[in-house]
Image: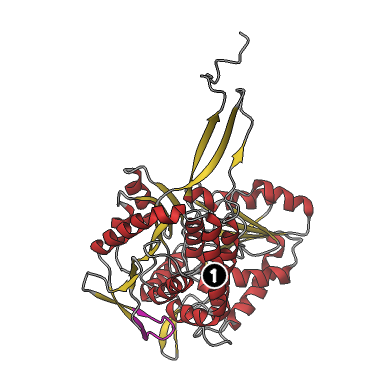
Amino acid sequence: MEPLNFINGQWQKGHSGQSFDTLNPANESIIASIVAADVTDVEAAVQAAKDAFNPWRLTPAPLRGELLFRVAEILRERKEELAQLLTKDMGKVIAEARGDVQEAIDMAYFMGGEGRRLLGYTAPVEMHNKFGMAVRDPSGVVGIITPWNFPIAVPSWKIFPALVAGNTLVWKPSPETPAISAAFVKVFEDAGIPKGVFNLILAPGADVGRALVSHPDVRVISFTGSTATGRAIAQDAARLNKKVSLEMGGKNAIIVMEDANLELVSDATLWSAFGTSGQRCTAASRLIVQKGVAGKLKESLLARTKQLKLGDGLNAKTDVGPVINKVAQERIHGFVQAGKKEGARALVGAEMTAVDGKGFFYEPTLFDGVLPGSMLERDEIFGPVLSIIEFNTLEEAIEINNHSQYGLSTSIFTQDVNRAFTAMRDIASGLVYINHGTTGAEIQFPFGGVRGTGNGHREAGQAALEVFTEWKSIYVDYSGKLQRAQIDNREE
Ligand code: UN1
């Protein structure tokens, strides 16, 4: 298979002349070789998106929405095929890959419906015979840069709202997942997207991304990925007054009160910490447990973690798939070794491993005795590593949660309604779960985080439209005379 760039409605090789391979992380086989795009391809893609903007902007929004409905239908038909390719491309287990595709289907229907909403508003005005309204305009050409961990779901949070609002776009997915990215774009082509509206650039390295970010004709950048890259993008984009939406790191916590249902806690913790091999922005990496139940919970988690089966995500018996690549495997191990050095105790895991001699696997790892403020408690590891921290009071637990440099997702387990409401009020995170793990966001609500996780924007839900539209306030004066706002119509 040879995934290609998609520029102005044409599938084409990149102009760099350099190839890069994508490996199946479960068995290291090559899935595809891609001739990478370079900055001339970025230029061509932005030009195509610019040329396509006017006709797409002037296509009635309900018709743009209908195209998204067609995309949704095709995604439904191809769900299994796409899920299998997704698992091969980045390793997550097949049930989760199906969920990844399903999230895009949900988003396509939701944003398709926005074609008949995209709500603005009217408000009374202070002058006679004058009318006021605020409407949403598309922003223009949008640059979308996405990671490999949710190669369909996360792009869909950006692509569908951008398109329904009337923007055209250039998408640069992670070079780890070119095959599934090209298959996703093919769905739009088959649904009849006009040429130039949706362009795909496949390339490794930072140069091509930087060319997109600093292109003067790209008005909005929507990025999900590491905090360091996100900050660099924001700095580059600031020079050209671009709108930038960033979704970055997390150090998500599950808080467990003594009154919690511990069996439920242990189910939710394993799923949140080790699902997608811990490579979610919403993965739980801190388990903050009230002292009285810490021993019992650790016992149950330890026994169940030992039973988790590592393997190829296509095998239905696999619980935990590989991590994305060798570099990630070694980086995770580096954190684990540093954690041991700072005095935490690994209860289980803490090893790089392979399955049948192949693949980039990391054993699900539990760390006990982790202290607030330590590296393990502070830094995002993006792997299957859970740090256990003990506390005495709810206030203390919330303080431990809130002092993190990140603020994406926090969950609390308690049966006490007063504690639940206190936590809902005082937890400073973009997502809060009560009696549920830290993952499992649905597309109709805003997704994003506070502090180092984001820069004040949200994806998904109607909030996503704020990123991809500009407000235009329109005043219609039908009085036939000059009426001075704030001055005429006043007694004094
Ligand atoms: C991510 O963590 O990178 O809530 C995205 C969830 C998914 C999306 C997560 N629906 O876990």
Q: Where is residue 173? Give x, y as percent.
A: 39, 66
Q: Where is residue 443? Give x, y as percent.
A: 59, 61
Quadrant occupied by the N terminus: bottom left
Mark 1 burial class by Cα count in 10 Å: few <14, some 14-19, many 20+: many
Residue 158 sits above or below residue 12 on the image: above
Residue 391: quadrant of the picture: bottom right
Residue 291 sits above or below residue 28 on the image: above
Q: Where is residue 255? Give x, y as percent.
A: 65, 59
- Measuring 55% from the left and 62% from the top, which residue is drawn there? 282
Q: Is residue 366 visible?
A: no
Label 1: element kind: helix
Q: Is residue 66 left or right of residue 23?
A: right
Q: Which residue is mark 1?
A: 70
The stretch drawn in magenta includes residue 31: yes
Q: Where is residue 487? Give x, y as percent.
A: 55, 15
Closer to the camera, 200 or 484? Answer: 484
Closer to the camera, 314 or 270? Answer: 314
The stretch drawn in magenta includes residue 138: no
Residue 209 sits above or below residue 475 on the image: below
Closer to the camera, 6 or 96? Answer: 6
- Measuring 48% from the left and 50% from the top, which residue is drawn there? 467
Quadrant occupied by the C terminus: top right
Residue 485: quadrant of the picture: top right
Q: Amino acid at mark 1?
A: Arg
Q: Residue furthest bottom?
A: 356
Residue 141 sits above or below residue 381 on the image: above
Q: Is residue 147 visible?
A: yes
Q: Residue furthest front?
A: 480
Number of labels in the image equals 1
Q: Residue furthest left?
A: 17
Q: Which residues are magenta?
A: 22-32
